[in-house]
Image: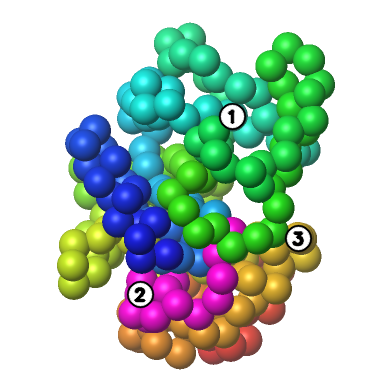
Amino acid sequence: MENIISQARTLLNERGLDWSICGGTAIDLFLGRQTRTHKDLDVAVFWEDRNSIIEFMLSSGWRVLQACGGGVVHELNKKQDEPFEKRNLFCFTANENRVILEPLGQERYKFGLEKLEQRDFTYVEFLFNERDTGDFYLPGEKKIKREIYKAILTTSNGVPYLAPEIVLFYKSSYLDGFDAADHYKDFNVSVSYFNLEQKQWLREALEKEYPNGHEWLQRLN
């Protein structure tokens, strides 16, 4: 993934965006080694940059699709000045042959991505977040937050990535789906490397999000 991250960094910095690697690749950056194969590159960005990202990716020759839920996507051909649904964006180049699109009409498709390792910078998913002057907010009604300087870390060579405790918090909601095995592995390989403050934040965030309990809390306690 090192070459893919390098290419993504060059592209995104060209636009002057605030971004950070997230998902399982962020776990690898935190640990300083690759722990498993990755089928896609996930990048965390902010809602206020959404239209800028759409315009930039389209002008750079990428296709841009908005997640609609249920595995359905809507292709975007321009920025959306009108109020928009808060959905992630899938972007890919013409030579990305792992993407499967089944037409549904009106620029909507049933979306699929073959579970094969990503080897080139031909695919990226943008995951959007909220912030204020000092805090990074996680999605949901409970307004769980993390100080921005703790939420976004940087590798020794300057690559920004989402803190692993936040990555695991996101993954905590998806332990029975298609990628569940990857989420369990990301937790198992990383949590023992957390400092006490990181473990405490994740424990408190999980307790707040899951008042009836969560299986990862046993490990954190």
Whole-percent x and y of residue 68? 68, 30
Relative vertical location of residue 33 with respect to residue 182 in this rendering, above or below:
below
State left or right for residue 136 relative to residue 96. Answer: left
Amino acid beneath label 2: Phe
- Residue at left offset 62%, top offset 70%: 183
Amino acid beneath label 3: Phe
Amino acid beneath label 1: Gln
How many angstroms separate mark 2 from mark 1 (CA)? 29 Å
Whole-percent x and y of residue 95? 55, 39
Where is the N terminus found, in terms of image quarters? bottom left
Task: Give SS at disc 2.
Answer: helix
Return the residue at label 1. Answer: 66
Q: Earlier in the sequence, mark 3 or mark 1?
A: 1
Q: Which mark is residue 30?
A: 2
Q: Which residues are magenta?
A: 27-39
Q: Main secondary structure of the magenta part?
A: loop
State left or right for residue 150 relative to residue 171. Answer: left
Query: In which quadrant of the rendered view does residue 188 lie?
Result: bottom right
Mark 2 surroundings: few (<14), some (14-19) or many (≥20) residues within 10 A: many
In the foreground, 33 or 43: 33
Residue 32 among those drawn in magenta = yes
Circles 3, 1 touching at the beta carbon (< 8 Å): no
